[in-house]
Amino acid sequence: MKIKATIFLKKLLFISILSFTFTIVSHAQNPVIDDLIEQIVSKTGAEDADFSTLVEDLNYYLQNPLNLNAATTEELEKLHLLDEIQIQNLQKYIQSVGQMQTIYELQLIDGFSDKTIRDILPFVKVEKIREQEKISLKKVIQRGKHLFLTETRFVLQTQKGYLNVPDSILEEKPNSVYQGDRFKFLNRYRFNYKDRIFAGITAEKDPGEAFTNYGFDFYSAHLQLNNFGVFKNITVGDYQVNFGQGLIAWSGFSLGKSSETQNIRKKNQGLRRYTSTNENLFMRGGGATVKLDNFEISGFYSNKNIDANLTTPDTLETEDLITTILNTGYHRTLSEIGDRKAINEIVYGSNITYKGKNYKLGASYIAYQFSKNIEQSAKPYKFFDLTGNRSTNYSIDYQFFFQKFSFFGETGMSANGALATLNGLLLSIVPQLSLSVLQRYYQPEFHALYGSSFAEGSKNSNETGWYYGLTFHPVRNIQISAYADVYRFPWLRYGISAPSFGNDYLLQIDYHAGYDVDMYFRWKNETKMHNVSGDYIGIRPLEEQQKQYFRYHLVYRLNRHISLRNRVEFSVFNADSTEIGFMAYQDVNYSFDFPLSLNFRFAIFDASYNARIYAYENDLLYNFSIPAYFNKGTRVYLMLKYKIADFLTVRMRYAHYYYADKDVIGSALNELEGNYISELKFQLKFRF
């Protein structure tokens, strides 16, 4: 115990010294946006989330601040910074006193703390409501804004998949090399005229992929028109569909479980342009939303080829069957290239929503069909999975407001008659105390291929649970957030050979000490059932696996040039044995008087894979890095951002892992001999 205590004290001393010795850093996206993204990621812990929609919305409002006097509920929700109660309180204030005269009136609204106001200030303004300007082709050409981004990244060391392999081995193992080079190339073009017209093109090649006869491996394009006559929205090309609470149709960003315990309701954005680089999870075709008084009617159609594994059945039938629909987007080896766009997918559907003064009701329908049948898997946990080549979903969603009370939910059915429902309650008891409750019940037989509602699992099926959240402000600068989520899985899951249960608890205390200092402490506990390891005959028994996380996070600003960010985090994994993880980092942010900024991080870590810890990192514009820290070593990254001219900005990022306990990094074709790995990224941004 004395030895462990000594090691612990040395680590804390080392971190304290780092806090005073490093003196450079900056923000990758934008100083304001980057801080907010880090806050949101640290609150959600969503290492796999796609934050493209969030960053795009924040960047737009940074350039075109939202007029609070004219803002709709949907526009306020796109900020992703205000919860349900705060939006309601803001709208009630404007209705009762008339248009706001100054931004400082936000201090008079219940639920708007100093920190909340500081977070939203860069993205909002207060002006008198003006009539909507008539649009013309001349105005679009003269006043439209263009953005072009080009970037590349690559690992400096040579991984196994890029080594030269003799032809004799290739004949025997054709998938033993990547078909392309180690460089990733990505180009994005974006155009917008205010909030009325949006257009864009994306072209991408992942590392290991080869350029084809058509150039890049993946192309995406979109055109979105807003508020043209009765049309609230017209979308052509690639787009997303978000209806209700995501029970049958949702893609893109949403918070889910986080320390923002009142942000459990998904913000319905209907049809929206697709701007990310996932090569499968989007619609390709067209859709529109018509607004008729209080009714909004949407319809959409999509037709595209998607990646899938196929197999030939051992019968007289010769038609291939789908074993797995793939979402990785990688086409690096001959096997992956063979799965590329292997099947055709058609998706179509509609939604009708009625918006009253204090309520909203909606009904949605979505149908999908594939060019080949999905195979019935012999694996027990996949017994209820979708088979055949088509299915449909229906749902109704609802939302009611009454003073400080908000009730919302969605109930749906799949083609086989299986049901799913979730229902939530938000309640502001007093300005200092808010509660939230959410119930969910998803039958194992329920299928919703494009659903993504509130859930512990990855699908809207085979789950029941109750979530309880609380936000409490005992004094002005302190916020206490807590939630408890208790759930069950009625059927088997991957790696779990019997019905199981689990729970998730979080407690976070935030302290906002004026403009210069913010800090929080977090405790998080996750308990789930998993198969016992080892050799067994018959059904494998289950055991509880518990993960606990203890985090202290501190942000402090020394002056207008320098800000520092520190984090110390411990993790404890308990199953048949106990494993402990540790991670700490120091960020220092520096912005020069001339248009150059730097970002630097030094991190140390010592954790097993089961006790791994995730941490958000600043990255290039529209890039997101949330690596896992495990094994024993250090990690360093450096970001440079230089604004050469008003129309041109260059970014560069270097990241480096060093492992003290490894001589081989990675696995399969990403394997690398040695104990360190480095990555370099470049990006040019043209705005005109």
Image (spheres, helix red, strand yellow):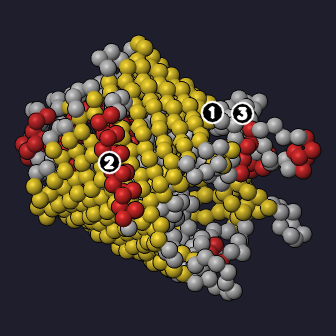
Image x and y of residue 568, in percent: 35, 51
Distance from Cα at disc 2 to Cα at disc 3: 44 Å
Distance from Cα at disc 2 to Cα at disc 1: 33 Å
Which amino acid type is shown beneath numbered disc 2? Leu
The residue pinned by badge 3 equals: 181
Identity of the residue drawn at 51% across and 70% down: 461
- Left or right? Give the position of 62 relative to 334: left
Identity of the residue drawn at 42% across and 24% down: 641
Image x and y of residue 24, in percent: 36, 29
- Let me know if residue 73 appears in the view: no
Which quarter shows the C terminus?
Answer: top left
Whichever of labels 2 and 1 marks the residue nearer the N terminus, that label is: 2
The residue pinned by badge 1 equals: 156
Q: Quadrant of residue 286?
A: top right
- Let me know if residue 429 appears in the view: yes
Is residue 488 placed above or below 455 in the rendered structure?
below
Whichever of labels 3 and 1 marks the residue nearer the N terminus, that label is: 1
Which quarter shows the N terminus?
Answer: bottom left
Residue nearer the viewer, 168 or 385: 168
- Left or right? Give the position of 580 relative to 355: right
Q: Of tags 2 and 3, which is closer to the observer?
A: 2
Which amino acid type is shown beneath numbered disc 3? Asp
Label of residue 13 in the image: 2
Identity of the residue drawn at 69% across and 86% down: 537
Which amino acid type is shown beneath numbered disc 1? Leu
